[in-house]
Image (tube, helix red, strand yellow):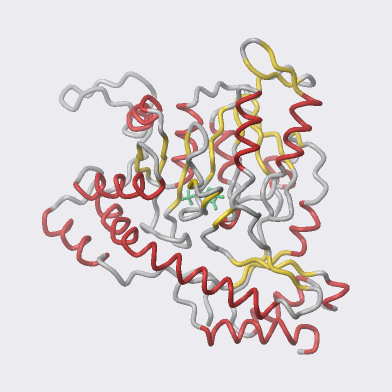
């Protein structure tokens, strides 16, 4: 079987985890938590990094410390994994869904139109004309590691006084104009889930340049405990901290990250070169001025030209024991969000219906890629 996304655990993972076990430092404090946080902060170029139990927890915490209130609205993309939408709901706020661009990222021009046409900037922030609700934040997702057009989006956020919380869970190692994703707004969030570019089994990280945001995030994610002796708590907090064992894995993975990024780049070039000649099939390419991590390789099928539908070729790939998958169902069509607000979603349905993720493990071999490409080349003739 050619797996979709397998972790690469060939560095110091075992050695560091063994050290945790031998010393007994297995839980949510320990030197590996500090070292992992320092390593991620240095790598992405942010002043602070706070380790979290997963990417969803990091996003939830980022929204809470950004000052979200129940009843606020938050601008989100419809084409993404559901986690950044659910965290809006956890806060008692409402998602407003946006369309995507050809890189599958949030359509920044449309966000601009939405703010101009449907919102009004008042002295204390931006309000939606239709609902009267405050628009608190925007959560762009750097889908599959391709950076969103984040500078223009950050300018819009500034103009309309919106908090910018980047869902950079898929984009560790991705840059927009040589600045790392996740570092453009109030906070950025990373995930170290098993299929991500590096993994801690499960884990996340909130990064920020704002000392107060970092302090509050650390506080909220440790049950808002004010002191260790008397156990007084000044807020409703969360148990969102990463363990030392997970951080030990994370530190070892950070050491391997530059090599992983190199392998992913080579893979992407290989797929791009060999898939180019297939009529009706194109790879999602990174937007100009960006340097992506190439986390997930994604193709778009034009069923008329390719003479095979997305689902037909998906079935073929699976029958050859190649783990490929369609991209997520659009969130404004998911059961919990069918009655939520959205703004002219036009491109996302077609792109979603034509996209396939190809195997992308860091350890993917040239032979395995050849097998995938061969099946795609034969397409309907198989
Ligand atoms: C875009 C996106 N946001 C958020 C998450 C949530 O991260 P986690 O699974 O670590 O909670 C993920 C992935 O899992 C994701 O792909």
Residue at x-position 62% and y-position 29%:
157
Which is nearer the eye, 173 or 311?
A: 173
41 lies left or right of 365: left
Report x, y in % for residue 343: 79, 36
Q: Is residue 151 left or right of residue 46?
A: right
Q: Is residue 247 above or below residue 51?
A: below
Which residue is rendered at x = 45% and y = 48% of the image? Answer: 190
Identify the residue at horizontal 75%, vertical 44% (top origin). 99
Q: Quadrant of the C terminus?
A: bottom right
Q: Is residue 195 above or below residue 1?
A: above
Rendering quarter of residue 318: bottom right
Q: Left or right? Give the position of 330 relative to 145.
A: right
Q: Nearer the viewer, residue 69 or 66?
A: 66
- In percent of width and height, residue 322 lies at 59, 79
Residue at the limit of the structure toward the top, as seen here: 123
Q: Position of residue 335 (x, y in %)?
A: 70, 45
Q: Is residue 270 above or below residue 152?
A: below
Q: Residue at x 58, y 57 (%)?
A: 144
Where residue 323 sits, quadrant-wise, is bottom right
Kindly give the residue lying farthest to the right in the view shown: 304
How far from the left and from the top, in percent, is residue 371? 60, 86
Give the left or right position of residue 306, taking residue 232 as reference: right
Q: In which image quadrant can residue 231 be found?
A: top left
């Amino acid at each position: 079987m050619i797996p979709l996304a397998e972790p690469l655990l060939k560095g110091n993972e075992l050695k560091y985890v063994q050290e945790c076990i031998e010393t007994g430092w297995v839980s949510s404090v320990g030197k590996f938590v500090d070292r992992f946080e320092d390593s991620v902060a240095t790598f992405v170029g942010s002043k602070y990094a706070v380790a979290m139990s997963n990417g969803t927890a990091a996003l939830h915490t980022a929204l809470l410390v950004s000052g979200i209130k129940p009843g606020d609205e938050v601008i989100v993309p419809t084409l993404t994994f559901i986690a950044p939408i659910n965290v809006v709901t956890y806060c008692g706020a409402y998602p407003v869904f946006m369309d995507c661009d050809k890189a599958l990222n949030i359509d920044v021009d449309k966000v601009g139109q939405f703010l101009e046409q449907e919102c009004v900037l008042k002295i204390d922030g931006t309000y939606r004309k239709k609902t009267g609700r405050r628009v608190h934040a925007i959560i762009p997702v750097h889908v599959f590691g391709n950076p969103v057009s984040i500078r223009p989006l950050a300018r819009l956020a500034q103009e309309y006084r919106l908090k910018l919380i980047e869902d950079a869970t898929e984009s560790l190692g991705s840059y927009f104009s040589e600045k790392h994703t996740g570092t453009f707004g109030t906070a950025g969030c990373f995930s170290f889930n098993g299929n991500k570019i590096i993994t801690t089994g499960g884990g996340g990280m909130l990064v920020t340049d704002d000392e107060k945001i970092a302090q509050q995030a650390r506080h909220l994610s440790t049950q808002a405990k004010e002191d260790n002796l008397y156990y007084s708590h000044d807020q409703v907090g969360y148990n969102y901290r990463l363990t030392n064992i997970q951080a030990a894995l994370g530190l070892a993975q950070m050491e391997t990250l530059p090599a992983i990024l190199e392998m992913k780049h080579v893979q992407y070039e290989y797929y791009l070169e060999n898939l180019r000649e297939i009529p009706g099939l194109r790879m999602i390419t990174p937007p100009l001025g960006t340097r992506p991590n190439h986390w997930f390789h994604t193709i778009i099928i034009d069923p008329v030209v390719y003479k095979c539908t997305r689902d037909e070729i998906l079935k073929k790939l699976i029958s050859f024991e190649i783990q490929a998958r369609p991209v997520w169902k659009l969130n404004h069509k998911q059961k919990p969000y069918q009655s939520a607000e959205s703004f002219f979603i036009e491109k996302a349905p077609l792109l979603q219906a034509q996209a396939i993720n190809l195997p992308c493990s860091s350890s993917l071999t040239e032979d395995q890629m050849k097998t995938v490409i061969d099946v795609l080349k034969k397409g309907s003739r198989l």
